Image (tube, rainbow, N blue to C red):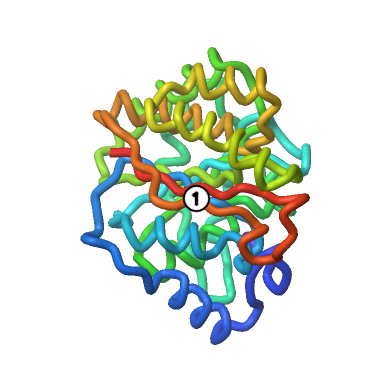
Amino acid sequence: MRHPCVAGQFYPKSAQSLERAVSEYLNVKVEKKEQAVAIIAPHAGYIYSGAVAGTVYASVKVPELTILLGPNHTGLGEKASVSTYGKWDTPLGEVEVDNGFVDLLLKDTELFQPDDMAHAREHSLEVQLPFLQAVNPETRIVAITLMHGSYVSAKEMGEHLSKVIKEYGKETLIAVSSDMNHYESEEETNKKDKLAIEEILKLDAEQLMSVTEEKDISMCGVFPAAVAIEASKILGATKARLISHATSGDVSGDKEQVVGYAGFLIK
């Protein structure tokens, strides 16, 4: 069992408060729930990024299997760490890990490694779980944290992931956890986020990685996003849509040091 490490910090610790908060964030008007190959949603404290994350999850159908891809903030564990816990616990209850998919993903490859150290204190995937539980309590997960790497390695990982998804044969959603630019003025963050958003909307993973490096855009989940984009295109995705964009300054009022948040559907 993987126990929560940021309950009571990034989101409410009590089941009742958490359920109420997630319900409020999900209570947004959307035309219809869409089938998507992948989504990108932020992972900051709910008070700052919950509205963007909620709008993404309110817009998508969550199927029986969700592959969670997020950045490794702690530096612990393997470069591409696949959780081998049987279940992940949250204040809302337990989420089952799809160990059949995990076994298939790890078979005959050096790209991904079984590793739980990377997940023990990592928040990026944990904060997605209450939204998944609220939208589809039956979904099973595969949790993968990724350290930054080259575009070539992102492409290879995306190819392997898509091959395993096809082979496994279950309806699957890839859920990327990422915030956008960090700790610059709102004006600068909006400019930088726009550059990254443009490449995501083009489904151009290589350019996304190039522009974030060249323009010093501190999008923490750029590598997981690149892996997901490469996998999604092989799985038939042809377009991406920006669902919502905001900054922490919208809540805090501090416009000098903000973090950007963006939510996308890829289908």
Question: Residue 127: horizontal and vertical position, in percent?
Answer: 58, 60
Question: Residue 77: horizontal and vertical position, in percent?
Answer: 73, 37
The one nearer the camera, 242 or 209, is 242
Horizontal arrangement in the rendering, residue 53 relative to residue 266 (left or right): right
**Where 133 sits versus 212, above or below?**
below
What amino acid does circle 1 point to? Answer: His
Question: Can residue 214 be seen in this snapshot?
Answer: yes
Extreme residue in the top direction: 152
Question: Residue 6: horizontal and vertical position, in percent?
Answer: 70, 64
**Where 221 sits versus 65, above or below?**
above
Extreme residue in the bottom direction: 16
Q: Give the quadrant of the N terminus.
A: bottom right
Say which element carries label 1. strand
Q: Look at 47% across and 40% down and name the residue there.
A: 102
Horizontal arrangement in the rendering, residue 124 relative to residue 38 (left or right): right
Name the quadrant containing residue 45: bottom right
**Where 66 sits versus 51, above or below?**
above
Q: Look at 58% across and 32% down and name the residue there.
A: 222
Q: Look at 58% across and 76% down and name the residue there.
A: 91
Mark 1 highlights which residue?
A: 245
**Where 140 sits versus 72, above or below?**
below
Question: Can residue 100 be seen in this snapshot?
Answer: no
Q: Look at 73% across and 45% down and name the residue there.
A: 185
Horizontal arrangement in the rendering, residue 129 relative to residue 48 (left or right): left
Question: Residue 113: horizontal and vertical position, in percent?
Answer: 60, 31
Horizontal arrangement in the rendering, residue 176 relative to residue 173 (left or right): right
Extreme residue in the front direction: 187
Extreme residue in the left direction: 32
Q: Give the quadrant of the C terminus.
A: top left
Crowding near the residue tagged with mark 1, few <14, some 14–19, many ≥20 C-alpha atoms within 10 Å: many
